[in-house]
Amino acid sequence: MPVIDSLVHVTPDGSWFGTRHDASLGRLLAEMDAGGVDRAVVVALAGHIDNGFVARTCAAHGDRLIPGASLDPSRAPSPARAAAMRRELDAEADFAVLKLHPRLNGYDPLDPRCLALLEANALCARPLPVWLDTIWRGPGAALSRAPADTVHELAARFPDTPLVLLHGGGPDLLALADMAGKFPNLTLDLSLTALYYAGSSLDADIRFALGRRDRVCVAGSDFPEYTPREYIARLRTLGRDLEPDKLDNVLGRTLARLLGLEPA
């Protein structure tokens, strides 16, 4: 099975939010080679990394990079305008996923504008799987409901929309892992969390997810925050007692199935 990184970023000049991380395309491709990663989902970040740049970058490396668009519904003056943002997206490029980042853009996922955008996505001729950042606590907009309740609401409201829960909710991972086993439209992503929280009680929760939710789990580096080698080594350590098939699911098969890259 191919290894697919669920979440990476590149920027035109390689800079990354004022840090020393190198987010250049050249480094990404080199790190993918070094880590044995066959393909990666490159996502835009509304207000920070342009959709057009991501589309062009991925088109130039179509055998390895999968393009993800990003929209910020909080920029829309009304739910109707947010819905139009999603309908207009299809004219820009042939994206494979849609990234929403409530914390970075400062909105509640249950904001009527976000719900309208998701409804418009569900009604499109080609609905996109939604990559939903679920590290929500921070200086951005406060949630109107608890993290697990927010995911429950979205999963129930949009049953035909695949929702990939990026970073697995961080500290809320176990609750989201449990939910991902009950809602067929939910996928638990372990990017960032498996490394950022290493050594915490979340290690046990991730081992649970790897062992019991492997068919609904994906993983990635969140490059340039981490590298493919780092996240793959971490998952192999946490999953050292698992059957090889389970890690194969998390490292590639589950995501390949979700994106239609292999027969179901």
Image (cartoon, grey):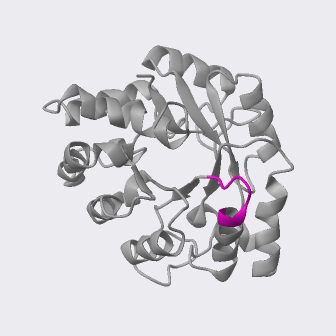
In the image, residue 67 above or below residue 113: above
Give the camera-side residue of 63 and 46.
63
In the image, residue 109 above or below residue 90: below
Identify the residue at image location x=52%, y=79%. 142
Q: Residue furthest left?
A: 241
User: From where the camera sits, is residue 190 visible?
Assistant: yes
Q: Residue 118's x, y, as percent?
A: 64, 68
Quarter of the image for residue 237 reads top left
Q: Residue 77's x, y, as percent?
A: 81, 80
Bounds of the magenta span? 122-128
Identify the main secondary structure in magenta.
loop
Give the camera-side residue of 9 and 23.
9
Q: Is residue 33 left or right of residue 104?
A: left
Q: Residue 94's x, y, as percent?
A: 76, 41
Identify the residue at image location x=52%, y=56%. 162
Q: Residue furthest bottom?
A: 144
Identify the residue at image location x=33%, y=29%. 248
Identify the residue at image location x=47%, y=38%. 257
Quarter of the image for residue 39 reads top right
Looking at the rendered image, the quarter that the C terminus falls into is: top left
Q: Is residue 47 left or right of residue 160?
A: right
Looking at the rendered image, the quarter that the N terminus falls into is: top left
